[in-house]
Amino acid sequence: MNLPNKLTVIRIALTPVFLFLFCAEFIPHNYLFALIVFVIAAVTDFVDGYIARKYNQVSDFGKFLDPLADKCTQFTLIVCLAIKYPVQNPMLWVLAGLMFVKEIFQLEELVFL
């Protein structure tokens, strides 16, 4: 496993950490900590792509894992915001639903190829 793939795995592992911190209202400044984790995940997303391209470490595993990590992070963020602000922005649930349906259809295409 090369460095870009390790960074992607770290990004996937940061998703439940973000979720916990976002929901842990018993922790002072939990949203700030969740934001810091989200920024770290975003930076690792940039860095893993940069390293993979610059040092020719692009792999089939990375091509599969990186978009998966992106989807996990994005979906978790949208659902967290939709739960936290259901009245202020009900369209977040529509967005989450559309993302989910899109991924189901893309998974179906992948399975039948």
Image (cartoon, rainbow, N blue to C red):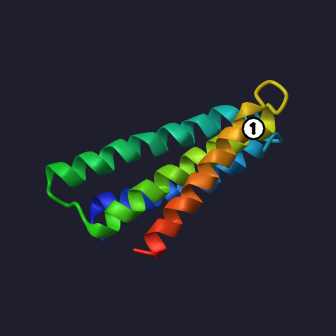
**Res 85 → quadrant:** top right
Residue 36: give x, y in percent of width and height: 55, 36
Left or right, 66 with respect to 54, comes to right
- SS at circle 1: helix
Q: Is residue 103 above or below residue 61?
A: above
**Is residue 10 among the parts visible in the rendering?**
yes
Q: Name the kind of residue labelled 1 in the image.
A: Ala
**Res 82 → quadrant:** top right
Q: Is residue 37 above or below residue 85?
A: below
Q: Exactly how many numbered labels are in the figure?
A: 1
Image quarter hosting the N terminus:
bottom left
**Is residue 29 among the parts visible in the rendering?**
no
At x 76%, y 34%, the residue is 28
| Circle 1 residue | 82
Q: Nearer the viewer, residue 90 or 60?
A: 90
At x 71%, y 50%, the residue is 20
Q: Is residue 79 above or below residue 12?
A: above
User: Which residue is most to the left?
Assistant: 55
Left or right, 62 with respect to 10, comes to left
Image quarter hosting the C terminus:
bottom left
Q: Is residue 83 above or below residue 5?
A: above
User: Which residue is most to the top?
Assistant: 88
At x 58%, y 61%, the residue is 104
Q: Nearer the viewer, residue 12 or 24?
A: 12
Q: Nearer the viewer, residue 64 or 18?
A: 64
Residue 94: give x, y in percent of width and height: 71, 40
At x 23%, y 50%, the residue is 51
Query: Callout 1 environment at 10 Å: few (<14), some (14 to 19), or many (20+)?
Result: many
Residue 91: give x, y in percent of width and height: 72, 32
